[in-house]
Image (cartoon, rainbow, N blue to C red):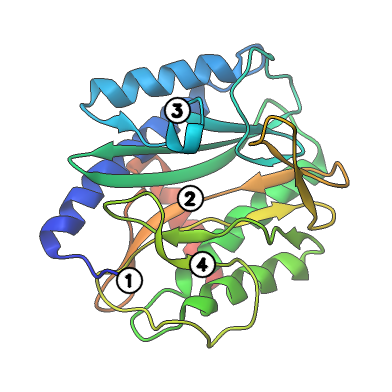
Amino acid sequence: MIVCRSRAEIEALRAVNQLVGDVLGELCELAVAGVTTLDLDRAAEERVRAAGAVPAFKGYHGFPATICASVNEQVVHGIPSTRPLREGDILSIDMGAVLDGFYGDSAVTVPIGRVSGEADRLLRVTEEALFRGIDAVKPGARVSDIGAAVQAHVEAQGMSVVREFVGHGIGTSLHEEPQIANYGPGGRGPRLAEGMVLAIEPMVNAGRAGVKVLDDGWTAVTRDGSLSAHFEHTVVVTGDGTEILTLTARRAARARELMSAVH
């Protein structure tokens, strides 16, 4: 069942998603060479709990951490570790929180120092694809219009969309209906309606689309060893388009630039 949220529920969702966006922004600044992803995980948990919220991922189906920290060829669900980040790495940070019974979820991929041209282009294309997907969100559109917009942009740049993991509805649970694939033809699936809250999250590989899960049961990596990036925003369908609930002041200028490029 797809839920359309009331104004009061959207206000609660806005609060928790702003918290997630703020914490992610802080983690991006902390993510430098020499820091470990376990350091970032501890900082995230401390910040979330200080705000009166609870990490959404920790303990979810047994996941052991507050953030998913995926480095280089790791696509998603990387477990934080004591491995120091190195100059030239790219790091995908995915995190969620629960506040007053409502969930927030967002992800970003950041360069660690100076990265290769390939890595820089991958990050740019993936973030652009996210905003292409967000631009497809409006009342009356179909769920699959989002993935069609993502796929068209990614493949036009010679990169691949990951098929195994999808975006999702979000509200009083972390994962709700509808599922939002990042590929496929548009014009299919449920119609979007005012009050729907969606987590849109393209995962893009510089090489082929195939992924595999490591023996830890969580970390997904590219089968061909190519780099992978992941960007995610939680949005609400409004009367005339969409509002990005996880968008914070520090990322607003970048969002305006990307949305302007779409048009």
Q: Which residue is mark 3?
A: 66
Give amino acid for label 2: Arg
Identify the secondary structure beneath mark 1. loop
Q: Residue at 50% across / 51% down in the picture?
A: 232
Q: Nearer the viewer, residue 137 or 208?
A: 208
Left or right, 155 with respect to 27, comes to right
Q: Is residue 207 above or below residue 108?
A: below
Query: Image quadrant of residue 238?
Result: bottom left
Q: Nearer the viewer, residue 158 or 56?
A: 56
State the mark number for residue 254: 2
Of the image marks 4 and 2, the number of the one nearer the N terminus: 4
| Residue 260 visible in the shown view | no
Q: Secondary structure at mark 2?
A: helix
Disc 4 residue type?
Ile
View extreme (right): residue? 224
Do callouts 1 and 4 mark residues in contact (Cβ within 8 Å)? no
Q: Who comes first in sequence, dot 2 or dot 3?
A: 3
Q: Position of residue 172 (x, y in %)?
A: 26, 52
Give the residue at mark 1: 2
- Label 4 or label 3, whichever comes before in sequence order: 3
The residue under label 3 is which amino acid type?
Answer: Thr
205 lies left or right of 225: left
3 or 1: tag closer to the N-terminus = 1
Q: Nearer the viewer, residue 246 or 114?
A: 246
Q: CA distance from mark 3 to mark 1?
A: 27 Å
Q: Residue at x 37, y 40 (%)?
A: 21
The residue to which callout 4 is attached is 180
Residue that appears at 58% across and 54% down: 127
CA distance for labels 2 and 1: 31 Å
Where is residue 196 shown, x and y percent of the image? 30, 69
Mark 1 or mark 4: name the one nearer the start of the chain: 1
Whole-percent x, y for residue 168 in the image: 45, 60
